[in-house]
Amino acid sequence: MKIFPLTLLGCLAFALSSTASADVPLLTLNLKQTTVSGLSSGGYMAAQFQFAHADWVKGAAIVAAGPVYCAQNNLLTALDHCINKITSPIPLAELTRQLKDWSAQGLLASEAEIKQSKIWLLHGTADQKITKQVADTLYQQYQEWLPATQLSYVQDKNFAHHMPTLSEGSACNSSEAPFLGNCNYDAAGEALKFIQADLKAPATQSSGTVYPIQQQKIAGQLAATMAEQGYVYVPKSCEQGQSCTLHISFHGCNQHADAVGMAYVEKAGFNRYADSNNIVVLYPQTRASKLMPMNPQACWDWWGYTDANYANRKGQQIQAVVKLAQSLSSK
C-alpha cells in the first residue's frame, strides 16, 4: 500500500479549486450506495450521519456507542447517562420525538428512507467505557425505526472498548491506544457483510493508495473543529476508472492520526475489503482542542460542542464530511 504526501504542485492546484482534493484522482463514485462506520464517538457520529442522510447513506456499522441525540446538546447529560454510567434514565421516547420532528422538517432523512437502512451494532462484554445499558438503548432506538431483518446486534463477545480485528492492536480485553483489539475477530468484515450487498472476500493484502485530503480547504469553516488533513483509501480499480462506492469510517476519541498515526486508517480492517469490492474508504479526522471548543480527546461532536444542530443535516461536522465525500467524485 502506498501513502502519497502532498506536493507543492498539488497544493497549488487545490488552491485553485474547492471541489477536489490535492493529489487524489477524481473518482467515479456511486455516492447513492454509501455506508458508514465508527467506534465510540465515531459510532455516535456514524449513527447521526446516517440518520441525517439515509437517502444516500444506506447502512451503518456502529461499535460501542449509544442512541442518537443521547446528550441532547448538553455535556452534563452526556456524562450523566450516555457513556459509562446511567445516573438517570435515557429518555428514549423524547429522543424519538426530536428525531421525528427533525425528519419532518427535512433536517434528517425521511422516516421511509431511514426504514430502508441496514444497521450493524457491536458492544463488547468487557467494554468499560460504554455500558451495556447505553448500547442496548441504541439497539432499542433502531428497533423503533427498522424491520428486525435489517438490524443486527452483536453483544456476546468478550471485547474491551476498541475496534476488534483479526490480529492488530493490543490484547482483546484491554482498551489502549491505538484502540484496535487483537481479538481474532474481523469486525470490519462482519459489519460490511451485513450492510453491503454481495460482499466479496477480502484481498490478501491491501494494495491501494492512502491519499491525504485537505479537509479545511475543502469544507472551509464547517471543518474548523476537524484536523487540517484527513485520509482516503483508493483501491487500484477505483483509481483506474472503475465505478466504486464509498464507505466513511469515523475514528474514536484519542484515535485520530495526530494521536495514533495511521493505525486506524491502515489497520482497522476495511481496506482489504475495499480492494476486492471496489470501495473507496474515507477516513475523516478530528483534532484535539482545550478551549473553544473543549475537546481535548479529539472526539466527534455528539454532545454539542460545535452547535445545537450537531446531530442533523445542519451540523457543521456532518456538512463538512458531506463536502469531503462530494469532493472525491467526478460525477
Image: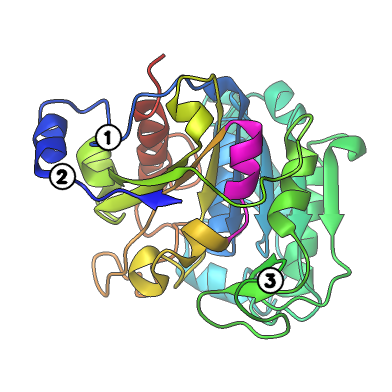
Q: Residue placed at 17% from the left, 25% from the top?
A: 17
Q: State the image quarter where residue 245 is shown.
A: top right
In 3D space, how far apart are the residues under numbered discs 2 and 1 (Cα atoms)?
12 Å
Q: Is residue 251 visible?
A: no
Tell which of 163 and 189 is nearer to you: 189
The secondary structure type at the circle numbered 3 is: loop
In 3D space, how far apart are the residues under numbered discs 3 and 2 (Cα atoms)?
34 Å
Query: Which corner quadrant holds the C terminus?
Result: top left
The secondary structure type at the circle numbered 2 is: loop
Relative to residue 255, is residue 223 drawn left or right? left
| Image spot of residue 235 (x, y percent) | 51, 37
| In magenta segment, residue 274 | yes
Amino acid type, label 3: Ser
Characterize the local packing of mark 1: few (<14), some (14-19) or many (20 or more) Cα atoms within 10 angstroms. Answer: many
Q: Which residue ends up furthest to the top in the rendered image?
A: 331
Amino acid type, label 2: Thr
Q: Badge 1 is on which residue?
A: 21
Relative to residue 232, is residue 53 drawn left or right? right
Q: Is residue 86 visible?
A: yes
The secondary structure type at the circle numbered 1 is: loop
| Image spot of residue 103 (x, y percent) | 60, 29
Q: Badge 3 is on which residue?
A: 167
Tell which of 231 and 298 is nearer to you: 231
| Main secondary-structure element of the magenta-colored stretch | helix
Tell which of 127 and 248 is nearer to you: 248
Magenta stretch: give its range.
Answer: 268-278
Q: Badge 2 is on which residue?
A: 7
In 3D space, how far apart are the residues under numbered discs 1 and 3 (Cα atoms)?
32 Å
